[in-house]
Image (spheres, rainbow, N blue to C red):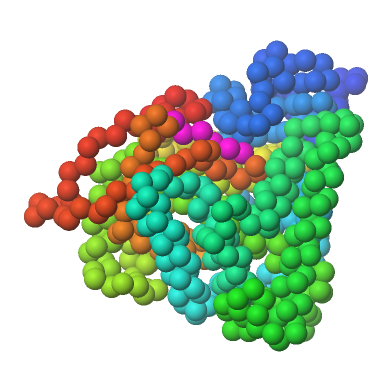
Amino acid sequence: MDGTKGAAPPALPKGFRSAELGWPELRRIPHPPYRIPFAGDLIGASVSTPVQDSLRHGRRLGPVFRRKAFGKEIVFVWGGGLAAELADESRFAKHVGLGVANLRPVAGDGLFTAYNHEPNWQLAHDVLAPGFSREAMETYHPMMLAVTERLMEHWDRSRSAGRAVDVPGDMTKLTLETIARTGFGHDFASFERTEPHPFVRAMVGALTYAQRRNVVPAPLAPLLLRGAARRNAADTAYLDRTVDAVIAARRAGSGESGGGAGGGKGDLLDRMLATAHPETGERLAPENIRRQVITFLIAGHETTSGALSFALHYLSRHPDIAARARAEVDRVWGDADRPGYEQVARLRLVRRVLDESLRLWPTAPAFAREARRDTVLGGVHPMRQGAWALVLTTLLHRDPEVWGADAERFDPDRFDPGAVRARPGHTFKPFGTGARACIGRQFALHEAALVLGLLLRRYDFVPDPGYRLRVAERLTLMPDGLRLHLGHRAPATPDGPRAEEAVSAARCPVTGARD
């Protein structure tokens, strides 16, 4: 195929089915050794960590490779130049597949899970985009502060009792409360609970089930996932009932949809209920509003909680960087008890810490792109219209040709403005790419920088010396079992931040490199 529309693909051997995948030259793309007929590349594979398995394979096989299991074959791409091609909106678009499609029973045609041809995506995007403007963000800022203060009260109690804090669990509570209050005027009372809110359990269950559907062969799913499918149906029904109740309370004008924080103040739910498209006059249908609320509650808390958790892990393991970031917070915020909106954006190093954490462990670890028309990727790999590839962000962010030979090392100064300008474009993609990239990116980054700034100013982070970073996969990535002890802030010395004892660095679970 020469890349022109309608060109005939090359002849394939009898029984060769790669053309069905839209990659006529699929056999040229390397795959792991020891492939088993029908079963595929299962030797040494882990059902619970498919992303980290793919990281290991990608290092050996190169920037384009494929994996197969039970007749399902996926082409992975991670090279910087190839990822830049796939980011070209004139040639490629978002592909909804794998675990994203598995979430459609929960989120339907919400912003994240809608197919490109479904009209509700563009309608919802245009209606909701003003909800993430600078003016809107300034109205969310006081609520973000209030939720973080509740977290710190909770952490103060743990510190006083000498208990370590459950970082992923508490970051999940924080980010769920933040998006629920700022977006929908709802209070889940997460910090008053000893167990996760049932809504959190249902969301985690839905994400985990979607991930399991990725690795279980479709013909065997009814047998192997029978119990899991029943639990997923119950989780989905609970999510629907909870969101329907929030919407009903708002429609009734009660202003008491779980606490009323933000209710009726022009938040995201108000926009969905009352705002028409500025050009067509269309409004979101009631069922789609429910799907959008579920989408924001899942996406708006899950990825941000992971980003904060990884950042806190790295700060605990790099006390010199934590001291620099803390000094920046002290300098920029001064004695202000509650920093203003503008002061958060001035935390340059704190933002670089977040970016570097998202580089090493982007909590959304991959995104799929499909060809808008027949094309050739990298001048070598022909793709038919509709053919797709999975951009493995976790490995794109470790490409040594882009990030250097020390790409495994945690170094926030990679995001110094000069270093950013010197790098090729489309090599840092924690929020996806193109028209379908995360609409709440600025919301998430502002929230995360505010939270890190407040926590740095209040605590020293003391890791468990025996802990080595483990990464749990449930469509998103999260540190597994991360607990930190909280030390009292010590005053700065005349020469700068106080010296810290060196802490032995953890090792990357994929490469064994120090993180």
Q: Residue at x 86, y 23 (%)?
A: 16
Residue 237, position in %: x, y?
81, 58
Res. 382 in view: yes
Q: Quadrant of residue 127?
A: bottom right
Q: Is residue 504 left or right of residue 233?
A: left
Question: Does the rendering let one see residue 419?
Answer: no
Q: Is residue 198 left or right of residue 303?
A: right
Q: Which quarter of the figure has residue 291?
A: bottom right
Could you tell me which residue is drawn at 90 percent across and 21 percent down? 15
Of residue 46 and residue 468, the one placed in the foreground of this image is: 468
Q: Position of residue 96 (x, y in %)?
A: 75, 50
Quarter in which the N terminus is drawn: top right
Q: Quadrant of residue 200?
A: bottom right
Percent x, y of residue 207: 70, 47
> Is residue 107 in the magenta section?
no
Asked if 94 appears above or below 273 in the picture, the reply is above
Q: Residue at x 85, y 34 (%)?
A: 221
In the rendered structure, the answer to whether residue 500 lies left or right of residue 98 reads left
Quarter of the rendering occupied by the C terminus: top left
Q: Position of residue 295 (x, y in %)?
A: 69, 61
Question: In the figure, 126 relative to 225: above or below?
Answer: below
Question: Relative to 467, does residue 210 appear above or below in the rendering?
Answer: below
Nearer to me, 436 or 154: 154
Q: Looking at the image, which is closer to me, 494 or 219?
A: 494
The residues colored magenta run 468-473
Residue at horizontal 70 percent and vertical 67 percent from the top = 293
